[in-house]
Amino acid sequence: MIASQFRFHGHGSLRYLFKNAQAIRSRHVTVKYIKNPHRKKSRFAVVVSKKVHKSAVGRNRMRRRLYEIVRNEQVRFDGIYDVAIIVTSAEVISVEHADLKRAIREVFTRAGMYNSL
């Protein structure tokens, strides 16, 4: 799980993100992101709808898996971003961790959020 300082607090900033951010889609997720120079650290949210998975246990498992990937990947970010990862497929709960990590890295790379390491 990522630390509280890297999460969104309240609905106002998430509403702004959903309205003004750019979106990149992949097979399992949609990533909405926007650069935020007013903050010192990036913020992340993972959204899993009841339409994707009915069980709260399953939705929370998907959320935890994605937060863990983001926690490890955020050191590679080039700049400060507000990022929302929206799960669009129930397969996220059962796909291999390496494949899910590769998919998230690909989306972040296409968005131009990574620096050149």
Image: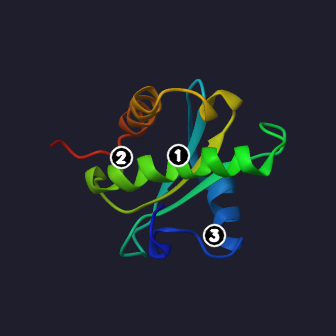
Residue annotated with mark 1: 65
Answer whether labels 2 and 1 touch (C-beta < 8 Å): no
Q: Earlier in the sequence, mark 2 or mark 3?
A: 3
Residue at 71% across, 43% down: 58
Q: Residue 113, labelled with which disc?
A: 2
Compared to residue 91, the image places residue 65 above or below, namely below
Tag 2, which secondary structure? loop
Tag 3, which secondary structure? helix
Compared to residue 112, the image places residue 44 above or below, namely below
The amino acid at mark 2 is: Met
Answer whether labels 1 and 3 touch (C-beta < 8 Å): no
Residue, far front: 57
Determine the CA span between mark 2 and mark 3: 20 Å
Q: Is residue 110 left or right of residue 15?
A: left
The amino acid at mark 1 is: Arg
Q: Which of the 4 image quarters holds residue 3? A: bottom left
Tag 1, which secondary structure? helix
Compared to residue 42, the image places residue 19 above or below, namely above
Residue 105, percent across and down? 38, 36
Q: Quadrant of the C terminus?
A: top left
The amino acid at mark 3 is: Ser
